[in-house]
Amino acid sequence: IYSLAFENNFIQNDQTWYVSRIMAYISGISSLVALATAWLLTITPLPASFFWPGVLLPAVVLSMLTGASKFLFFDTQICTEPLWYIDADSPPVAAQSCEIGESSVFGIASVAAYFFCTVLICFRSPQKRMLDENWGKR
């Protein structure tokens, strides 16, 4: 059970929950763009010299930055403020302990994976090759 102060401070008035949700949507959408671009570069003859640095790299960097920024918005005030009721008749108390949830651990792991992908994308981009015009002809 939580107090009315919790609802007023963290659900109605706190914009960080709203902004974090927007950051999660941006991160998810740009991840899907990066995934689609990587698959299209693999199975179609798209010009990698344009799509690699122009679409794939910005999508992965945007996913990484918006995924990491979700953690910057949250505060420990939800753990330290007297917002929680033990039962309906008791006064509000602060939480006894706070720990990172499973979804936060997966969020941190995804940011690490995006960073690794960014390093791999920047490490070596595909180079344009000279093709043999007579290849495959008899």
Image (cartoon, rainbow, N blue to C red):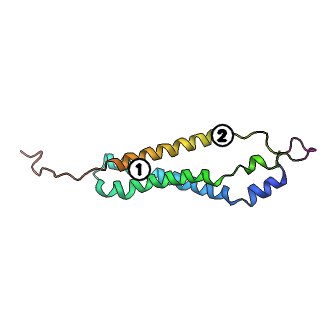
The circle drawn on residue 98 is: none
Give coordinates of residue 109: x percent, y percent.
53, 41
Residue 39 magenta-drawn? no
Vertical arrangement, residue 54 with respect to residue 100, above or below: below
Dot 1: within a 10 Å radius of its alpha carbon, few (fewer than 14), some, or many (20 or more) residues? few
* Identity, as a three-letter code, of the amino acid under mark 1: Ala
In percent of the image, x 90 and y 47: which residue is there? 91
Q: In the image, which is nearer the foreground, mark 2 or mark 1?
A: 2
* Identity, as a three-letter code, of the amino acid under mark 2: Gly
Q: Main secondary structure of the magenta part?
A: loop
**Disc 1 designates what residue?**
36
In percent of the image, x 92 and y 44: which residue is there? 90
Q: Residue furthest left?
A: 138
Which secondary structure lies at badge 2?
Answer: loop
Give coordinates of residue 125: x percent, y percent.
31, 50
In percent of the image, x 15 and y 51: which residue is there? 131
Residue 18 quadrant: bottom right
Vertical arrangement, residue 105 with respect to residue 81, above or below: above
Q: Residue furthest right?
A: 89
Earlier residue among tags 2 and 1: 1
Relative placement, left or right, of 61 versus 82 is left
Which secondary structure lies at badge 1?
Answer: helix
**Disc 2 designates what residue?**
101
Relative placement, left or right, of 45 versus 82 is left
Give coordinates of residue 97: x percent, y percent.
75, 39
Relative placement, left or right, of 73 versus 29 is right
Residue 85 quadrant: top right
In percent of the image, x 51 and y 46: which residue is there? 111
User: Range of the magenta residues?
Assistant: 85-91
**Gap in Å between the C-alphas at discs 2 and 1?**
30 Å
Quadrant that contains the N terminus? top right
